[in-house]
Image: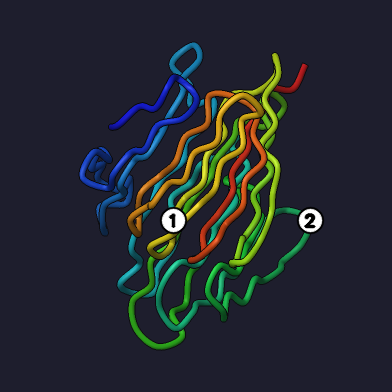
Amino acid sequence: MSNHSNLFSVVPQSDYLRMPWKNGLGETLEIAVSRENDEVLYRVSQAAVVEDGAFSDFSGLHRTLVLLKGNGMILSHKNAQKEYQHNLEQELSVAHFAGGDSTYATLSNGAIEDLNIMVREGKAGSDVQAIFSPAFFDVSRDSHTLFTGFYANSDCVLALDFASELHTVKLQSQSMLLFSHTAKVTLESGSGVAISIYSID
C-alpha cells in the first residue's frame, strides 16, 4: 500500500487477502473488511465465477455485486416472499440482493470476475456506482463514513481535488484507491467502481 499526505492511499491487487469460499468452489480476494462482535460489518472483495452454481448463504448481509470481466451471468434469487433475477450482461452491471436469499449463478458464456460489497443489514449501508471516463464524482466523508474507495476495472488516471491539495493518480487495473478525506474526483481515463459504506444509527 502507498500513502499520500494522509489524504489517500493505493492498495494493489497483490496486497489483497486470498480467502477460500464457504462452499469450497473457489476463492475471494478480500480487499477490505470490518468486523463487529465477531460478525462482518462490511466487506469489499473480488472473485471469479468459473462455473454455474449456488452462492454461499450470507444471511444478515446485504450484497451488491458488480460484473467486472466476462460475458455476463444471470443471478436467480428466491426467498419466502418472491423469486427474482438479475441479468448482468455488460461491464460494471450491478445487482443488489439479500445475502440470505437462495441465489444461483448461471454463466452466459465462460468465466466472469466480479466485485462484491457486503454490509450488515440494519447496521451499515452502501452506495455503489459504476464510473466510466470522462466523469466527475464527489467523495464525501463524515462521522458515519466507514469506507470510501474507487476500484479500478482498467488502468485509470484520476485527478483528485482535496481543496488544499491537487493530485493526479495513475491507478493500475484491479487496484483500489482509498480516500481518507472528502474530495472532488475527475476520472480522466479508464473505468471503475466508486464505493461508499456508512453506518446506520
Circle number at residue 81: 2
* Mark 2 Cα shell of 10 Å, populated few (<14), some (14-19), many (≥20): few
- Say above or below: 177 vs 76: above
The picture quadrant where one finds residue 141 is top right
Circle number at residue 152: 1
* Mark 1 Cα shell of 10 Å, populated few (<14), some (14-19), many (≥20): many
Give how far across and how far down residue 197 sits, in percent.
62, 33
The residue furthest bottom is 109
> Residue at the spot x=52%, y=31% of the render?
179
- Say above or below: 145 vs 121: above
Q: Are marks 2 and 1 in contact (CB under 8 Å)?
A: no
Check disc 2 and report its element: helix, strand or loop.
Answer: loop
Give how far across and how far down residue 55 sits, in percent.
45, 57
Q: Amino acid at mark 1?
A: Ala
> Residue at the spot x=64%, y=71% of the render?
86
Give how far across and how far down residue 168 sits, in percent.
47, 45
Left or right: 42 in relation to 18: right
Left or right: 82 in relation to 130: right
Left or right: 145 in relation to 180: right
> Residue at the spot x=57%, y=81% of the render?
89
